[in-house]
Amino acid sequence: MFEGLFKRTKYITVNPSNVTYEENSNNEDINEQKPNIPNGMWVKCDSCGCTIYKKDLEKAFLVCPNCNRHFRMNADDRIEFTLDTGTFLEYDENMQSCNPLEFPDYTKKIENQQKNTGMKEAVITGEGTINGKKTVIAVMDSRFMMASMGSVVGEKISRAVEKATNLELPIVIFTASGGARMQEGMFSLMQMAKVSAAIAKHNEKGLLYITVLTDPTTGGVSASFAMLGDIILAEPKALVGFAGKRVIEQTIKQNLPEGFQKAEFLLQHGFIDKIVDRKELKETLSKIIDMHTIGR
């Protein structure tokens, strides 16, 4: 009468050499009864610990719905959500680094980065429209050697600025970098001056340059073109600075304030103009460009 009404209980036997699953009847494969959840469906927010369905996170522009943490975004996705669909024309897409100092294993490391990211280098440049306004854009991608600034990164950004100058267009640069690329030594450091000089010529023509500081923007990039924008925007809680916090504290023998080098701290002390949530960024850029181009 009661046959099959109650499920048989499984238990675990712990053995000093291994762990085995046993049943008091029916030798079913325990693996067949585990839920089949594909890898990568869920993402954990490192800031608040919230577990987020990956597709929901993508719809929210990679922003945590619980704590508003802005996850790092790759260059292709930034271009897609910033520019009008189908308007992007890439510059210098096949330019890639050589090994000017014959640094050991540098060529192999570049090849591995290209394979893993699908990018030739740590920045993508080109032109497109933002709500119908033609604009030159450069987007750095921290997946590629932490967007360290080598000779190709500097050259591509310089060429993009020069193109904007010649076409009399505004330029928007999304910065993200761990600093200069040590494998290229002085060639890397030279890019700071080269990009800054190109921006100065762009400025002499009265053209608009907007920087968007994303997490992280550090080292030589923050010490040069990242802070030269006519308008400097930042994403919430982005890390922005030159040297690391511990290095500064050890040098000056003092403890730094809470939140030092975060975007909010920089805004409070006048280093940047505005912190903008990612979902509002395209509209904000559009309004700034509209105001600057009135009467041109």
Image: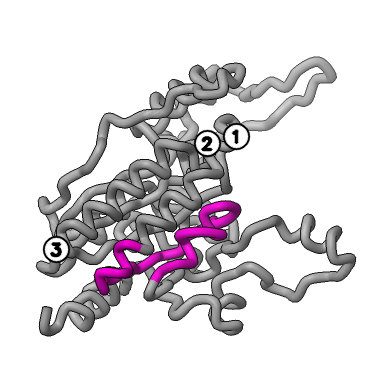
Q: For the residue carrying disc 3, how many other residues have a C-alpha within 10 Å: few (<14), some (14-19), or many (20+)? A: some
Q: Quadrant of residue 62?
A: bottom left
Residue 261, given in percent of the width and then of the height, sits at 64, 68
Q: Which residue is mark 3?
A: 134
Residue 108 makes an appearance in the image: yes
Q: CA distance from mark 2 to mark 3?
A: 32 Å
Residue toward you, 62 or 92: 92
Q: Height in image: 223 above or below 132?
A: above
Q: Residue at x 45, y 48 (%)?
A: 42
Q: Which residue is mark 2?
A: 187
Residue 78, given in percent of the width and then of the height, sits at 31, 54
Q: Residue at x 78, y 57 (%)?
A: 246
Q: For the residue carrying disc 2, how many other residues have a C-alpha within 10 Å: few (<14), some (14-19), or many (20+)? A: some
Q: CA distance from mark 2 to mark 1?
A: 5 Å
Q: Earlier in the sequence, mark 1 or mark 3?
A: 3
Give the amino acid at mark 2.
Answer: Phe
Residue 126 falls within the magenta-colored stretch: no
* Mark in the foreground, 1 or 3: 1
Instruction: Report the coloring of the rendering.
Output: one colour
* Mark in the foreground, 2 or 3: 2
What is the number of callouts on the image?
3
Q: Quadrant of the N terminus?
A: top left
Q: Earlier in the sequence, mark 2 or mark 3?
A: 3
* Magenta range: 201-229
Q: Quadrant of the C terminus?
A: bottom left
Q: Secondary structure at mark 2?
A: helix
Q: Which residue is mark 1?
A: 185
For the residues bearing labels 2 and 1, Cβ distance under 8 angstroms: yes
Q: For the residue carrying disc 1, how many other residues have a C-alpha within 10 Å: few (<14), some (14-19), or many (20+)? A: some
